[in-house]
Amino acid sequence: MSSADETLETIRTQVEDETPDDVEIASVTFEGPELVVYTPDARKVADRNGIVRDLAQRLQKRITVRPTPDALVPQREARDTIRSLIPEDAGVQNLDFDSETGEVFIEAEKPGLVIGRHGETLDEISAAVGWTAEVVRTPPMESSTVSNVRNFLKQERDERRDILERVGRQINRPVSDGEDWVRLTTLGCCREVGRASFLLQTPESRILIDCGDKPGAADEVPYLQAPEALAAGPNSIDAVVLTHAHLDHSALIPILFKYGYDGPIYTTEPTRDLMGLLQLDYLDVAAKEGRTPPYESQQVRDALKHTIPVEFGNVTDIAPDVKLTMHNAGHILGSAVCHFHVGEGLYNVAFSGDIHYKDTRLLDGAVNDFPRVETLVLESTYGGRNDYQTDQEDSERVLKRVINEAHERDGKVLIPAFAVGRSQELMLVLEEAMSSGEIPEMPVYLDGMIREATAIHTAYPEYLRESLRQRILYEDDNPFLAEQFQQVDGGDEMRQDIADEGPCIVLTTSGMVTGGPVMSWLRLLGSDPDNTMAFVGYQAEGTLGRQIQRGQDEITLSDRTGPRAERVSLKLNVETVDGFSGHADRQGLETFVETMHPRPEKVLCVHGDESSTNQLSSALYQNFNMRTFNPKNLETFRLV
């Protein structure tokens, strides 16, 4: 018998000892970080409050109880019973039964009504039909990404089950006795913005945090082949943890599967969907620009198939000696501050990912309250001495002024923005400003992936600010569906028609002008001095956005199909509107550390250029008397 089987047998004995005598335990198995208990008496368990909770507390594991096949009411009868138990105004769209696991997936417009107060309706369903009910939300806006991901995962249920069982056995393998230590190796993102990647190691485990590219520098990838990283091969990694979906953190995760990785990816559910959207677009842009993509779409599907969603605040075992807890980072939808608890109280490390400390129209600010933290790995994008952004209210006033001035000239406003995060923030500002009359009503054209990314936001309203969530779910007032927002879906022909029409706003990707539809808009709008280009986000060194921001008035558009690159003379106005960034500014970063509970002993300043990381590191040391570091790539820190 293997050690994993012995562990399961021991756990089964504990489960049998802790459950009432009239509850039969058929089997127990690991599925990723969860322990799954199969019983023909699942209805009895559902009827008795506290059994699962008490088991979870005693075993220190997340537990799911599922019925054995003989305990299930036939699907046709179960379907009718389930529909009779759910309020009609819940808007149930579909019931999907998985006979292998005894689960029924209920898709509904209002999941809360399906769940019921404190889960009462779900318990009623399980007690009545035996099936374990899982609820998914019908997106208020149709999203091909959400639909495709859900259908793909449904098709891959059997393989996903095998993956989860294998991961569960790895997590629950015995830990050998010996010296305790924790190391952190920087594989990218140090003294630079982009290609985020870190390796957290113990004698038992290797956890890779993020694996992104570097905007404007396609050849600079994380040091995945360095001896400090994957010298033993990708399969030596126990888990990959993704802080959020932006490509400088997620773009190269699929390449791990190309190299042979076959393990889990832990991230939030919206990040999983956004990751797939952005990675597929990454491949598409590379192909259009004549570059050889570093991986294929199959590896993107592999990454989705291996993703294990984590909810904010849930403590999740990801290795024999490492627990992960994700908290809201306030940067984009689903972005997370990742807290790692190593060993039995040995050490705690928090990775900020990208953070925004203050609340915005879209998201609540970043969480910085933890049980314990000895080391913080902190982003420093705006860590420079003078990197203070204006308040968002002031920024909104500036943006409205820029739009009004362009409108008075009969010009157009071109806003390059990240499809995820900044675009939705701007849509909320524009919708309110037009409703209140602060700017004239005019079309707002969404180009690139912006509309699809917005639809994903509406599929996960629980991750948005309460006031916005209320508008989307309960007030039939979804601001993202305002009539002024129009999708550009006719290619260059439609763009030409828009350019020939009157004043409008064009919200388009890419945010740093590194490719995508913004290049076509520069060709169409760049030579007219009545038009304005407004930068609302960070422009990394080496990107075309940074060059235009600095005053370059002639550019080469090399991503257009044709025999030669095209030179375009820029005569449009160029404005920078600070305050819309998804990153905390210098004050926000300092406040995040100052108010952090508990305050860490060490801080590693990363994800910023050399001057920014150095200046933030010095300030934190001087102001808070803590050990701070401004690491280079390929440094290894022994934390304990």
Image (spheres, rainbow, N blue to C red):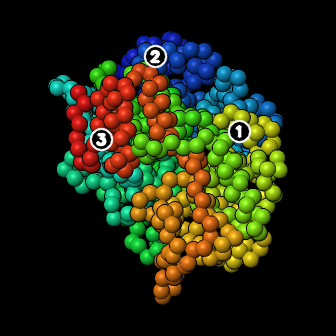
Marks 1/2 in contact by CB < 8 Å: the verdict is: no
Residue on which the image places disc 1: 468
Residue at 77% in and 49% down: 433
Badge 2 density bin: few <14, some 14–19, many ≥20, Cα 10 Å: few
Residue, far left? 178
- Of the residues shown, which amino acid type is indicated by label 1? Leu
Badge 3 density bin: few <14, some 14–19, many ≥20, Cα 10 Å: many
Can residue 125 be seen here? The reply is no
Q: Residue 528 — which label?
A: none
- Of the residues shown, which amino acid type is indicated by label 3? Asn
Looking at the picture, how far across and down is residue 280, in whole percent? 50, 61
Residue on which the image places disc 2: 57
Q: Residue 630 — which label?
A: 3
First-in-chain label (2 vs 3): 2
Residue at 48% in and 88% down: 563
First-in-chain label (1 vs 2): 2
Looking at the picture, how far across and down is residue 536, in whole percent? 58, 54
First-in-chain label (3 vs 1): 1
Q: Quadrant of residue 499?
A: bottom right
Marks 2/3 in contact by CB < 8 Å: the verdict is: no
**Residue 621 position (above or below residue 490):** above
* SS state under label 1: helix
Relative depth, front residue between 477 and 304: 477
Distance in Å between CA atoms under marks 3 and 1: 38 Å
Looking at the picture, how far across and down is residue 615, in whole percent? 36, 41
